[in-house]
Image (cartoon, rainbow, N blue to C red):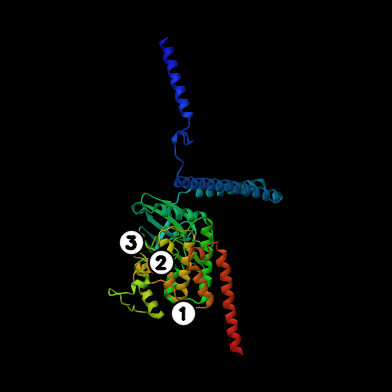
Amino acid sequence: MDSARSWFTKLQTREKSIGKKKELPPNGKEGGEEAPSSATKQRVAVAKQYIEKHYKEQMKKTQDRKERRCSLEKQLAENSNNMSEEEQHNIVKQYEKKETEYMRMQRHKMSVDDFDLLTMIGKGAFGEVRVCRDKATGNVYAMKKLKKSEMLRRGQVEHVRAERNLLAEVDHHCIVKLYCSFQDSEYLYLIMEYLPGGDMMTLLMRKDTLSEDEARFYVGETVLAIEAIHRHNYIHRDIKPDNLLLDRFGHLRLSDFGLCKPLDYSNFPDLNEKDVTSAKTQQMNGDGKQQSLPKRTQQEQLEHWQKNRRTLAYSTVGTPDYIAPEVLLKKGYGMECDWWSLGAIMYEMLVGYPPFYSDEPMTTCRKIVNWRTHLKFPEEAGLTTGAKELISKLLCNVDQRLGTKGAEEIKVFLVFFATCLAAMFFLGRFSKEI
């Protein structure tokens, strides 16, 4: 009897607990649980995308194997009169052996031991880039080696993950290709396309300035690269000549996606457009008298820029010359900030130095924020009206900036720019003939 009562008591307790679980709190969410955060949703989306891509690739590999087998059997059937059964059997055995070796190779776990490490071509805050050669195939790649402990200490894990995800997701001829990635206990390795042409920074240091035709070519390829990452809802945020690489044919590739942040924003205070140290205030001394700041010619400014260029590129703080004002103001920004950087790069290609260059990075930041006062085109550079107009439409307010409604706006303007250049060329040639 006692055992029956205890059993009945347990049953009642269980029914009550189940009833409580079915009751919803006032907010309508079971158990009072909050909705998942945006970061959780993003991780779920990335995991879903990875799983779908993985199984899609596996299904494609299986289908490819079936198609290869059917193709072989069809060929053997067509040539059955010219081959004995033993010869056909040997061909099938050889095919199966190759398929097995191929599948074993696909399952092979890559490691640094599979590569011969050659020349170092770059070194950063927590990693290095080396030229390497695959021991099996002899192909040459660029190996980016990142120290995991340093990445964790500097809080750069998300940046590295973003770069890896973007390179794996975006397949475009103007984006550096990622072939594979692996890791060991200490380092993360990214095996990427090796580009022997150097970068845009080196090209500009060697040539000083580019012609408008050359600038239009490189700007056009940069537009295609930026458009490719924007289509996948990524913002580069670090478009600069150092990250525009050249292949052996001179074509451009965009690199460094969120991994290297050359500007440490913590070193600069929050800026605003009414900064007390604006251009007008900077020219006043303590007595309120106008100071005559030393003015440099284009050649002097170019020499000064080249002297400090590499030092600024690899310093702790870096150079803010290509960063959009909305980024410096820390008021929120979107994909439009990449188009501002493109305008600053085009200005440097044609003039020889960035539009807001100064001896001090902080002064450069103030000039960018007060861009209306400081954006000027030196007469010595001899820029055409079309070039000035394109740069001005990139270095402006977000709501007026070319590219805000998509890259097609800039493409149309580049075509117009090219037409103007061609017209000027033919008019100049015609006037000489007259």
Q: Position of residue 34 (x, y in %)?
A: 44, 39
Circle 1 is placed at which residue position? 381
Instruction: Name the quadrant containing residue 147.
Output: bottom left
Q: Quadrant of residue 323?
A: bottom left
For this rendering, which residue is in front, 402 or 271?
A: 271
Q: Residues within 10 Å of mark 3 (few under 14, many from 20)?
A: few
Crowding near pointer 1: few (<14 within 10 Å), some, many (20+)? few
Outermost residue to the left: 286
Question: What residue is shown with label 2?
Answer: 369
Give the left or right position of residue 44, taking residue 433 as reference.
left
Q: Where does the image place residue 309, in percent across and percent down from the top left?
A: 37, 71
Q: Are marks 2 and 1 in contact (CB under 8 Å)?
A: no
Gap between marks 2 and 1 measured at Cα: 24 Å
Q: Is residue 100 above or below residue 131?
A: above
Mark 3 / mark 1, whichever is N-terminal: 3
Measured along the vertical axis of the image, is residue 66 above or below residue 226? Answer: above
Front residue of 230 and 315: 230
Q: Secondary structure at mark 2?
A: helix
Q: Which mark is residue 30?
A: none
Q: Does the image show residue 249?
A: no
Q: Is residue 145 above or below residue 412?
A: above
SS class of the residue under badge 3? helix
The disc, 2 or 3, on the residue closer to the chain's N-terminal end is 3
- Are the residues tagged 3 and 1 within 8 Å (C-beta)? no
Residue 310 in view: yes
Number of numbered discs visible in the structure rendering: 3
- Front one among 333 and 412: 333
Q: Residue 35, image x and y in percent? A: 46, 41
Q: Give the position of the C terminus as an image quadrant.
A: bottom right
Q: Nearer the viewer, mark 2 or mark 3?
A: 2
Residue type, mark 3 in image: Asn
Three-letter code, disc 1: Ala
